[in-house]
Image (cartoon, grey):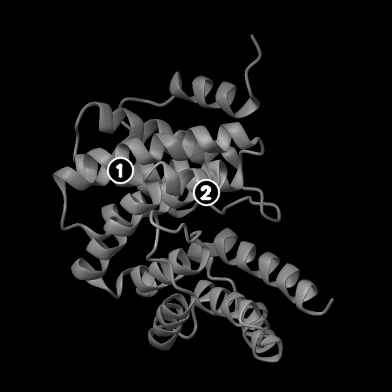
Amino acid sequence: MKYSFSLLLFLSLCAFVPESETLTDGIELYDNRAEGAVGLKANPENLFKALTIFQNAFNRKEDLEISGLYLMRTQEYIARFIETETEKKKQRFEAERKIGEQLVKLYPNSAPVRFAYISAIGLWAEQVGAMKSAKDGVLGKMKEQVEALIKIDSMYNNAAGYKVMGLMNLKTPYIPFFLTWPSDKEGKRLVEKALKYFPKDHGNNYYYAEVLEKFGLKDRAKLYVNVVLALPCRKELLLEDRKFQEDAKQLLAAINK
């Protein structure tokens, strides 16, 4: 049986994480997750160590909201910036999604938990395909979660609820008699709303550029692409912002064709 490098590293680190390691230690490791990164590739050592700390704490039901939340965040970060195989990514997003299902029932008014769950559903759905996710009811469940997030805290994570709901309207396939809520017009309105509240957010500018390109407004789209490229990458979101800038370059190339 063959094992991936990331799995072997995780198993080896499990054996060497001292019992004295605390959630605070894990959070510090996670907060420094971009340390030693090369391009869009994160350094796995600290992330897998953090993952072990959070998994052990979650298994012990220690401060379940915090340990579960950071376990989800770490799984997602590893999937996005360490794993290269589609199946491995999907497995991590699925693991994150299952934890989220538990946590939203226990902490229904937690915006961070709700958003992490939404993110897990969305990233997992990207791996399996929008049409399958729609027919399996996954996107309907995600829509319910986003609506709940907007009610709890519409400004959380730079108006993420408005942005995600807008993107769902724009990217979810319209299926007559089955899935009739997606609307490009409503999607554009909601992404604009997120950008209005947080005009210096990389994601808000990038997704608005995507919207404008979709509506054929290429010159305006270029303006927002250039905003993404001009914004400095935040230390606490270094790889996330770099990824938006890489995507912005690809979008600009597509617009200029």
Q: Position of residue 150 (x, y in %)?
A: 26, 69
How many residues crowd mark 2 within 10 Å: few (<14), some (14–19), many (20+)? some
Determine whether 69 is above or below 11 in the image: below
Instruction: Specify the quadrant that holds the C terminus.
Output: bottom right
Q: Judging from the image, what secondary structure is the residue with disc 1 in?
A: helix
Which residue appears at 74% of the width and 71% of the height? 249
Which residue, given by chain and number where applicable, does mark 2 sit on?
131
- In the image, is residue 30 above or below residue 216? above
Instruction: Report x, y in % for residue 14.
Output: 44, 23
Q: Nearer the viewer, residue 140 or 249?
A: 140
**How many C-alpha atoms fall within 10 Å of the one at disc 1: few (<14), some, or many (≥20)?**
many
Q: Which tag is nearer the camera, tag 2 or tag 1?
A: 2
Quadrant (top left/top right/bottom left/bottom right) for the N terminus = top right
Q: Is residue 78 left or right of residue 115?
A: right
Give the amino acid type for the residue marked by disc 2 in the picture. Answer: Met
Quarter location, residue 151: bottom left
* Viewer-side residue, 88 vs 191: 191
Q: Residue at x 66, y 48 (%)?
A: 41
Q: Give the image location of residue 200, x and y in percent.
A: 49, 83
N-terminal-most mark, 2 or 1: 1
- Is residue 218 left or right of 50 when viewed as pictured? right
**Amino acid type assigned to the residue bearing label 1 in the image:** Gly
Task: Residue under label 1, please give it.
Answer: 100
* Number of numbered discs visible in the structure rendering: 2
Asked if the residue at tag 1 contacts the one at tag 2, i.e. Cβ–Cβ closer than 8 Å, the answer is no
Under tag 2, what secondary structure?
A: helix
In this view of the protein, can residue 215 be seen by the observer?
A: yes
- For image coordinates 42% across by 88% down, the residue present is 196
